[in-house]
Amino acid sequence: MSAQPRPLTGAERRAANQRMHAEARQREQAARGPKGVAAAWWDRARMVAIEQDRKGNPGAWDELALFLSNYCDRYSQ
């Protein structure tokens, strides 16, 4: 007799829903080609920075801003 899986907690259910949404969004963006892939990475970078900020590491925003500044400086000349 096999044990039934336990129900997901609210946090686990939220995380699973967020993961499914992110994966669907990535597939949609990938279908748009390089512009869509870049948009998907931008979405992910913001999510990581938000997560890090919540964990007490606001420096993640500074690092992201510096990376974007360097990128813009490199390609806008």
Image (cartoon, rainbow, N blue to C red):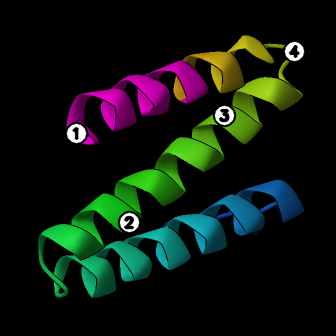
The mark that comes first in sequence, 3 or 2, is 2
- The residue lying at 83 percent from left, 21 percent from top is 55
Predominant SS of the magenta segment? helix
The mark that comes first in sequence, 1 or 4, is 4
Q: Is residue 18 above or below residue 42?
A: below
Amino acid bearing label 2: Ala
Structural distance between the alpha carbons of marks 1 and 4: 32 Å
The mark that comes first in sequence, 3 or 4, is 3
Q: Is residue 47 above or below residue 21?
A: above
Residue holding disc 3: 49
Residue 69 vs residue 26, the one in the foreground: 69
The mark that comes first in sequence, 3 or 1, is 3
Label 4 sits on a secondary structure element that is loop
Amino acid bearing label 4: Gly
Amino acid bearing label 1: Tyr
Residue holding disc 4: 56
| Residue 48 in the image, given as x and y percentages of width and height | 60, 38
Q: Which numbered dot is residue 39? A: 2
Q: Residues within 10 Å of mark 4 (few under 14, many from 20)?
A: few
Q: Quadrant of residue 62?
A: top right
Q: Nearer the viewer, mark 3 or mark 2?
A: 2
Magenta residues span 65-77
Q: Nearer the viewer, mark 1 or mark 4?
A: 1
Q: Quadrant of the C terminus?
A: top left
The answer to whether one can see residue 1 in this image is no
| Residue 71 in the image, given as x and y percentages of width and height | 32, 32
Q: Is residue 60 left or right of residue 8?
A: left
Q: Nearer the viewer, mark 3 or mark 1?
A: 1
Structural distance between the alpha carbons of marks 1 and 2: 17 Å
Structural distance between the alpha carbons of marks 3 and 1: 23 Å
Label 1 sits on a secondary structure element that is helix
Label 2 sits on a secondary structure element that is helix
